[in-house]
Amino acid sequence: MLNEQRELILGRVRSALADSGEAMPTGGPMASAAARSAGMPAGTPGALAERTAADTGDADDRALLAAFTNEVHRLHGCVRTIGNRAELDAALGDLVRSERIRAAQLWQTEDLDRLGVAATLAACGVVIVPPDAAVGEVAACELGVTGADALLPETGSLLLRFDAGRPRTASLLPGIHLAIAWPSALRRGLGQALGEAGGRGPFVLITGPSRTNDIELTVTVGVHGPAALHVWLMDLSKEEK
Amino acid sequence: MSTMREPIDFRGRSAEVPAEMSAAMRQATARTGRSRAEVVAAFGNERWQAQRRAGQAIRMDTLLHLDQHLTTLEAAISAAGGHVHWAADAESARTIVLEIAQAHGVTSIVKSKSWTAKEIELEAALRAAGMNVLETDLGDYIVQLAGPRLPKHIVPAAQLTRQCIADLFRQELGVAIAGGPAADPAPEPQTLTLIARERLRAAFLAADMGLTGANFMVAESGTLVMVTNEGNGRMCATVPPLQVVLVPITKVVPDWAGLAVLLDLLPRVATGQKMTSYVQFMHGPRANTDGYGPRELHVVLIDNGRSKLLGDEMGRRTLCCIRCEACLHVCPVYNTVGGDSYGWVQPGPIGAILAPQVLGLNVAHALPFASTLCGACNDVCPVMVPFTEVLLNLRSKVVAGDGGNPPAVSPVVVAGATMAAAVLSSPVLYRGAAQAAAVLQTPWRKGDWLAALPPPMARWTAVRPLPVVSTAFRRAWHARAKDSSLGAPLSRARRGLAWAAALLVAGGLAAWLGHRRRGVG
C-alpha cells in the first residue's frame, strides 16, 4: 500500500514533467547552490548570499551588535552587555529577585559552565532542573538559560542548536528565556547562519518573545513560548576564549 | 481531490456576506499591509525585487526536478529516524493518519494551524474515530470553543471583543475572570492570553499526539521547517510522544541556500515581520538529539491533485506558491466577500487560480471571474506568480470550453466577438463598418442618441442610451462641446489659444525681419 502510493505519486510527477518537454538534467540529482547559481541569472541563491554578505560587509562588529540590539528592543526583548563575571553574578541575582525565580533549566555547555551560571543561580536559592528533566518539571520553571549559536543583526534573531545538554525546552517552556551569548556569534545573514547549522540536527530561530494578535488585533506576548526574552552579551574586551 | 463536487457558486455565496464582515477584514488586512510596506522598504526595493526573482527561480527549478528532490527528502528523513508516508489523495492521507493514531492508542491530539489538514477534511475523520482534536493556535482555539454560536461570516481577531472572549472563557472553561459579564473595563487581552496559555499548556502535556503542518522541507537533510509566532507549533512538536506532519509534495526545497532565500521572503509578506517569533527546524525524532521532541515522527507527503499541474508552465507557476497569503490581504474581492465565498479551503487570488486547475473547471469555473484583475496580487507575491495572466488564461478556457467542459457562452456570441475583433483591428473594415452603422442605426435613432436597441444591446440601452455612430467625428465632437456646459469656456479657450498663436507668429516674424535688416548671421 505504502509503496503503491509512492510509485503512483512519483509516476504522476515524472510523466507530467516529461510531457511538459522540459529537459531533465543528466548530472546528479542536486547541484550545489553555487553550481546552480553559476548558470542562473543574478539574484539566485549563491549570488544572493554574497550580496547579503556584501550588504553588511562594510559594517564592523560594533555596528552589527548595535543593529542586533536595536532589533531585539524593537520586539520588546531586552539586550544588555555584561563586562565581567561580577557583573554577571549581580545581574543574575537581580533577575532572580525581580522575577521571583524558583526553578530554572540551563544548558550544560562549556561556556555557561565556565561562567558558573548554575552555581550563581543555585546560590540565589534557585533549583536547577537538569537538561534531561521531564517536560512537566521544566514547565514548572520560571527561567530557561541557554547560549546562542548565531545572532542575526538584520532581524534580531538568535539561532539555538539542540543536542545533548542543550535542551530545546529551556527556550520554550519557562516564562523567561535568558540567552547568554558572545559577539563572536554574530553572523552577517540568514544564509550564513543556516549554512552552518543546517543538517546538523534540530534547531530554532528565535526572534523576540512568543506573540499573537488574535484578540482584537492587539499584540500580546507569552502565548505558549516565553513572554520575556533577555539576551546578555559578554563584552568583547572581556571575552574569555 | 474529491471525486464528485458541486460547482462552486461564488456569486451566491458572496451575496450572503454581511457588510460588517468586510469592514472587519479590511481593518485586519490594512494593518498587515502597513507592516509589510515598512519591512520591504527596510529591506531595500532593489534588493527585494532581486529576492523575489531568486525565490521564483528556486521554486520553478524545484518543481522541474520534483521527483528527484522528493526521493532525496525521503531518504534524508528516514536516515534521521523519521517515517515517510505517501498519500496520493485526501482519502489515503486520512487513512494513513488514522492508522498511525490508532496503532498508538491515541485519544487526544493537539493541532497547530494546517491548511493541508483542512484540505483533506482530517479533523472530522479523527473525531469520528473517537479522538479529541484541540486547536492550539489562539484564534483557532477561541473559534473552536465558541463552536456553532459563532456567526458564519466573522473575522474573529477583528470582530470578537475582549468582553466576548472573556464571557466565552467563563462559560466554557469555568474560569473566574475579575469583573463578571459585561464588566467595565473589560479584561485586558494579555489577561485572556495568559488564561489560554495555562489551559492549552495542560492539554499539551496530556496529549498523545501532535498534528502539524510544515512550511518547507529541506531535501538535502530531511529537515522540516515551521514558521510561527505563538509557540504552539513548537509545543506540538516538542511535548507529545508522537508527531504527525502533513505536507503537500510541492513544499520541498532542495537545499539550505534556497531555504534562506525563501525565509527572507515569507515572514515579510505574510505577516509584515522581518522574521516570525519562532522558525523551528525539525530533524527526526528525539533519539540522538537533546532527548526532547517526539519518540516517533511521521511525515505524510500529500499529492491530492497537485502533480497534474506540473505538466504545463501555467500550472508550475501556480505551484510556486509558498502559502504566504499576501495575495489575500491585498485583494479587493477577498477583502469584500471573505474566504467562505470561494467554496474551497484556499480562498483569495491563489484559490481562484489553484482550484480550477486542481478541482477542474466544471467545479471551479466561477472562480477565475472572482477578480477585478487589478494586479495587486502580482505585485505582492514573493515568488512572482503571474495571477492575472493565469486568470485570463483560465477565463478563456471557461468561455471557449476546455476538455469535457462545454463553452460558457453561445457560439453566436463567440462569432460576434470574433467578428468585432477582426473589424476593430483593420482600419479599412473599421471605417466601412462605421459608415454602415451610421445608416443601419436610423430606425432606432432619436436625435443624437440610440435609446432602445434590439437584443443583445437591449441590456445596455435599458440602463443608458448609446451616442449615435457618426462618421464625421470632428463635427460630432464640436456639436457636443457646443451643447455641453463646457461649450462656452471651450470656445473662449480656443479663441485665446488662437490669439496667442497669432501673436507668437507675428513676434517671431518681426524678430526675423529685424535680424535680416541688421545683416547679422
Image (cartoon, grey):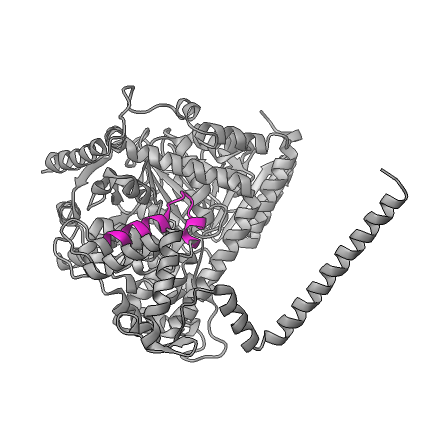
Q: Quick one: which residue is furthest to the top in this view?
A: A27
Front residue (pair B503, B388)? B503
Predominant SS along the magenta part: helix
Q: Quadrant of residue A64?
A: top right
Q: Is residue B111 visible?
A: no
Q: Position of residue B495 (x, y in %)?
A: 68, 68
Q: Residue at x 15, y 58 (%)?
A: B5
Above or below, comparing residue B51 to residue A224 in the picture: above
Front residue (pair A228, B142)? B142
Q: Where are the magenta residues, as a range? A: B376-398
Q: Residue at x 40, y 26 (%)?
A: A33
Above or below, comparing residue B418 to residue B293 in the picture: below
Q: Is residue A55 left or right of residue B330?
A: right
Q: Position of residue A154 (x, y in %)?
A: 55, 40
Q: Position of residue B267 (x, y in %)?
A: 44, 47
Q: Quadrant of residue B218?
A: top left
Q: Is residue B385 magenta?
A: yes
Front residue (pair B309, B424)? B424
Q: Quick one: which residue is furthest to the front in this view?
A: B517
